[in-house]
Image (cartoon, rainbow, N blue to C red):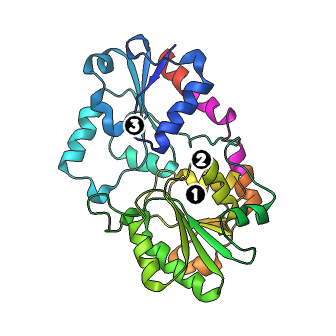
């Protein structure tokens, strides 16, 4: 069996997953669509760039990350069912998305979180040196967020499914409790939260184009990483923070309940009662590190091919 993964080339996390796969699964992978026995549509939003003749004649697995039903309009529904006719089986990265997808299709759905590379994301013991490198003091209380929060169409409106309004509310709450609070932001499209922090006069540092090595270092300077989304497939930050032993709190989205302790999952109303459980999250994330984190994917693909 040879599997072909759809090519995204958008410098997004899915590109990294695709690269990881080809590096670690050369024995069952091909970069040539015509020679593949099975197509894995790992980037479903560009599925129609794959010639239909291949979709018709090869087994096809499609990954779905989340479904925003509030914005699932007529055109998106049409696109889903146009694609669905070519799909043999679905893959999701959280049980929450599995439940969403069940309302749209009767085809088999398998939930497996994506892997995390613990050669890239890991705990750095010397926190003082890392903090010094990035201009932070040892007594700073550093809260981090590395996920985009702003709509691309105007680069100022909040992307509400990511919960930037919730993030800002919690940062203000923490700022009132700690005079040494600093905010650390990374990633693209952070204009909304940056504007809000500037208005409130809350100090922050922003690393828009940090590479993967830097992202791991940034996790390691944090006292707290916050996931405040209303809807997520992952996010992968939960696994990255957990495997780097970064204290993390999250709303009840995506893989949160599959990785984090119950006390680390919050609603806005009970945020003050939530508490990171570093060891619990680390142990749960360990089983998704490379290569173990890929074994269930290999089984999924072989089972689909053979059946």
Of discs 3 and 2, which sits in the foreground? 2
How many other residues sit within 10 Å of disc 2, few (<14), some (14-19) or many (≥20)? few
Q: Secondary structure at mark 2?
A: helix
Residue 179 or 298: which is nearer the viewer?
179
Residue 218, visible in the rendered structure: yes
Q: Secondary structure at mark 3?
A: loop
Magenta stretch: includes residue 285 = yes
* Disc nearer the start of the sequence (3/1): 3
CA separation in Å, label 3 and label 1? 22 Å
Q: Would you name the residue on which mark 3 appears? A: 43
Magenta stretch: includes residue 50 = no
CA separation in Å, label 3 and label 2? 21 Å
* Placement of 306 over or under 89, stated as above or below: above
- Seen as rendered, the residue at the extreme top is 35
Q: Is residue 257 left or right of residue 39?
A: right
* Disc nearer the start of the sequence (3/2): 3
Q: Residue at x 53, y 37 (%)?
A: 17
Residue 254: image x %, image y %?
Answer: 51, 54
- In the picture, residue 56 is in which quadrant? top left
Q: In this picture, which residue range is highlighted in magenta?
A: 284-300
Q: Secondary structure at mark 1?
A: helix
How many other residues sit within 10 Å of disc 3, few (<14), some (14-19) or many (≥20)? some
Please give the count of numbered marks on the rendered protein. Answer: 3
* Placement of 88 over or under 139, stated as above or below: above
Residue 42: image x %, image y %?
Answer: 43, 34
* Disc nearer the start of the sequence (2/1): 2
CA separation in Å, label 2 and label 1? 22 Å
Q: Would you name the residue on which mark 2 appears? A: 212
Q: Would you name the residue on which mark 1 appears? A: 256
* Placement of 243 over or under 193, stated as above or below: above
Residue 85, visible in the rendered structure: no
Residue 301: image x %, image y %?
Answer: 52, 24
């Amino acid at each position: 069996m040879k599997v072909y993964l759809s090519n995204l080339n958008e410098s997004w996390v899915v590109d990294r997953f695709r690269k990881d796969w080809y590096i670690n699964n050369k024995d069952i992978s091909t970069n040539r669509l015509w020679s593949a026995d099975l197509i894995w549509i790992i980037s479903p939003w560009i599925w129609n760039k794959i010639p239909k003749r291949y979709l018709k004649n090869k087994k096809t697995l499609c990954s779905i990350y989340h479904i925003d039903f509030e914005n699932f309009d007529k055109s998106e529904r049409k696109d889903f069912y146009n694609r669905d006719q070519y799909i043999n089986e679905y893959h999701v990265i959280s049980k929450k998305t599995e439940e969403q997808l069940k309302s749209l299709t009767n085809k088999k759905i398998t939930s497996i979180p994506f892997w995390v590379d613990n050669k890239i994301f890991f705990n750095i013991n010397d926190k003082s040196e890392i903090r010094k490198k990035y201009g932070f003091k040892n007594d700073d209380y550093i809260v981090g967020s590395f996920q985009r929060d702003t709509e691309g169409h105007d680069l100022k409106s909040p992307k509400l499914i990511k919960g930037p309004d919730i993030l800002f509310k919690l940062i203000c709450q923490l700022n009132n409790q700690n005079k040494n609070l600093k905010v650390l932001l990374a990633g693209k499209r952070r204009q909304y939260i940056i504007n809000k922090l500037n208005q409130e006069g809350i100090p922050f540092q922003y690393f828009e184009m940090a590479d993967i090595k830097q992202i791991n270092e940034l996790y390691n300077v944090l006292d707290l990483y916050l996931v405040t989304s209303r809807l997520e497939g992952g996010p992968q930050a939960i696994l990255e923070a957990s495997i780097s032993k970064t204290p993390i709190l999250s709303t009840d989205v995506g893989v949160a309940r599959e990785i984090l302790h119950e006390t680390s999952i919050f609603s806005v109303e009970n945020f003050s009662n939530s508490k990171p459980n570093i060891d619990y999250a680390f142990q749960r994330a360990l089983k998704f590190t490379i290569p173990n984190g890929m074994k269930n994917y290999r089984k999924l693909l072989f089972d689909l091919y053979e059946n």
